[in-house]
Image: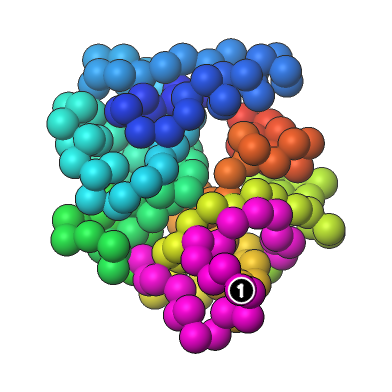
């Protein structure tokens, strides 16, 4: 059972549809009570960092999520801004993050980007796992994922870097610390590559 955290930010139905295709049951959590007994969690997110953090706090789920993730060690994956929220802080806002992974969120240096339209980083890009991890089973080579972001996740501990991509230089696009996973790209928009990754998360 995958519990998808619905705090008003992110396309929840897209994840439900992916898991229907691979025959994995899902549950949508909108309150702390809905999170009771969660076995695996997805934290989606789009838009501005502070807005997403504010909405999560307003949902009343923050404290329960900290208990599940940090105390009970329930596997969780953050996606796009959901990943960024797992860090300590962001250049995009003033609020503190969840601090589930020791990382800071930085804005891309536009002077290093060669494309005419520099930000956001939008479209398909290669993802290169830098360590063996079941999340990337079957995706070790030539995996392409869809990105849409102007900020990236900078791990303070290099051991937490799970995969990298290139945009004006190498950046971390997937991170992992104990039971916590974060991915900057959108698996729900990445066709069979994303379906494979989300199915892998269900099997962790």
Q: Is residue 22 visible?
A: yes
CA neighbours of label 1 inside 10 A, class few (<14), some (14 to 19), many (20+): few
**In this picture, is 88 found above or below 59?**
below
**Which residue occupies the foreground of this view, 158 or 141?**
141
Residue 133 visible to an observer of this rendering:
no
Q: Quadrant of the C terminus?
A: top right
State the residue lying farthest toward the bottom: 111
Residue at left 34%, top 68%?
Answer: 104
For residue 125, which quarter of the picture? bottom right
Q: Which residues are magenta?
A: 105-129
Query: Horizontal and vertical percent for residue 123?
Result: 65, 54
Residue 118 x %, y %: 54, 71
Residue at screen point 28% across, 34% down: 65
Residue 198 place in picture, x, y as percent: 64, 35
Q: Residue at x 30, y 19 (%)?
A: 30
Q: Nearer the viewer, residue 73 or 160?
A: 160
Question: In this rendering, would 200 be left or right of 152?
Answer: right
Which residue sits at x=35%, y=19%? Answer: 29
Q: Quadrant of the N terminus?
A: top right
Judging from the image, what secondary structure is the residue with disc 1 in? loop
72 in relation to 82, above or below: above
Viewer-proximal residue, 69 or 139?
139
| Residue 13 point in image, percent of width and height | 52, 20
Quadrant of res 67: top left
Counting the numbered discs, the total is 1
Judging by the rendered image, the residue that carries numbered circle 1 is 116
Q: Residue furthest front?
A: 116
Is 191 positioned to the left or the right of 84 in the image?
right
| Side of 41 relative to 142 (left or right) | left
């Amino acid at each position: 059972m995958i519990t998808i955290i619905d705090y008003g930010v992110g396309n929840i139905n897209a994840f439900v549809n992916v898991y229907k295709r691979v025959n994995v049951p899902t549950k949508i959590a909108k309150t702390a009570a809905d999170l009771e007994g969660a076995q695996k969690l997805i934290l989606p997110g789009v838009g501005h960092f502070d807005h997403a953090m504010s909405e999560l706090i307003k949902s009343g789920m923050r404290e329960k999520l900290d208990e599940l993730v940090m105390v009970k060690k329930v596997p969780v994956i953050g996606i796009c801004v959901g990943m960024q929220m797992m860090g300590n802080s962001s250049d995009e806002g003033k609020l503190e993050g969840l601090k589930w992974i020791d990382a800071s969120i930085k804005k891309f240096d536009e002077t290093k980007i060669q494309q005419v339209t520099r930000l956001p980083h939008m479209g398909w890009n290669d993802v290169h796992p830098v360590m063996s991890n079941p999340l990337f089973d079957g995706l070790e080579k030539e995996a392409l994922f869809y990105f849409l972001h102007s900020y990236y996740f900078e791990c303070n501990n290099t051991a937490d870097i799970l995969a990298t991509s290139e945009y004006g230089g190498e950046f971390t696009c997937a991170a992992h610390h104990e039971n916590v996973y974060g991915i900057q790209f959108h698996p729900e928009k990445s066709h069979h590559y994303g379906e494979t990754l989300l199915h892998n998360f269900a099997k962790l």
